[in-house]
Amino acid sequence: MERIDKVISRELNIGRSEAKTLIKQGRVVLNGLPVKSFNDKLDEEKDILSVDGREIKLRKLVYIMMNKPKGVISSTDGRKTAEKTVIDILPEEMKRKNLFPAGRLDKNTTGFVLITDDGEFAHRILSPKNHVEKEYIANLDKPFDDELIGAFAQGVTIGEDECLPAGLEAVNGDHKTARVTIRQGMYHQIKRMFKKFSIEVLELKRIRMGGLYLDEALAPGECRYLDESEVDSINQNNLR
């Protein structure tokens, strides 16, 4: 059971105070009857909710895009290290049971993190055999050359790990700012790939998962729900 104001806030992507205003104005109907109290709850499996006469399709599962800031870990529980997690910094109205980040970014890597409670979907997009692309912008301490582009395209070996072929190109002709596309998610993969060639990654930001780019309107730490078409597009790679 979920509070109705919380569900409206989530489904309409509005603030909790706006949801309460809709209830106060008598514009919210549950199973044919106007909602009278902010504290009323609904069963998302059975109940029918409408706002202004339009039925709201209730989401049993949610998908959230976050622009992860620095200093936050991609985890559900930071108590062991006393650190903030991406779940901790979600707005209260977005928090619900069983949310987790689908794939991890390092503590100081920023950008697109997908937060969901859909374990099957997360497994599908993270499975190495599905090769869903992830695209990053990396700021480097020194420029890369065409030889490194070729090495990435062939697949770099780092320690005992064999990297799949990866895309590497300069951003706006600047060879100290790299656009990197990978199809895996190994530990510190991009940083380790560059380090093998004596290049240090100074800043790293993920800007795409599959065919979905990070919403540029999201400031660091901000997030929003994804609609069905956006979720579907994550499964669609979008090579430049």
Image (cartoon, rainbow, N blue to C red):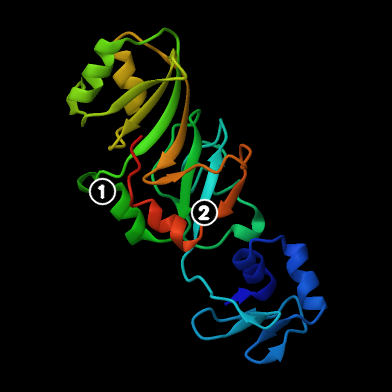
Residue 90's place in the image compared with 192, above or below, is: below
Is 228 placed left or right of 17 in the picture? Answer: left
**Horizontal and vertical percent for residue 133?**
32, 40
On residue 81, the disc is none
- State which quadrant residue 39 falls in: bottom right
Identity, as a three-letter code, of the amino acid under mark 2: Ile
Picture quadrant where residue 180 is located: top left
The residue at the far bottom in this view is 32
Amino acid type, mark 1: Ser
Q: Is residue 181 left or right of residue 116?
A: left
Would residue 151 be found to the left or right of residue 99 on screen? left
The answer to which of marks 1 and 2 sits earlier in the sequence is 2
Q: Is residue 211 above or below residue 152?
A: below
**Is residue 72 in view?**
yes
Alpha-carbon neighbours of circle 2 within 10 Å: few (<14), some, or many (≥20)?
A: many
Where residue 127 is drawn, which disc sits there?
A: 1
At label 1, counting other C-alpha atoms closer than 10 Å, the crowd grade (few under 14, some 14-19, many 20 or more) is: some
Residue 86 in sight here: no
| Disc on res. 64 | 2
Alpha carbon distance from label 1 to label 2? 20 Å
Question: 189 above or below 197?
Answer: below
The picture places residue 148, in percent across and down from the top left corner, at 27, 14
Residue 71: image location, x then y, percent: 56, 31
Q: Position of residue 96 (x, y in %)?
A: 55, 62
- Image mark count: 2
- 109 or 140: nearer the eye? 140
- Name the element at disc 1: loop
> Which residue is found at the position 69% from the left and 85% from the top?
29
Q: Is residue 225 above or below residue 219?
A: below
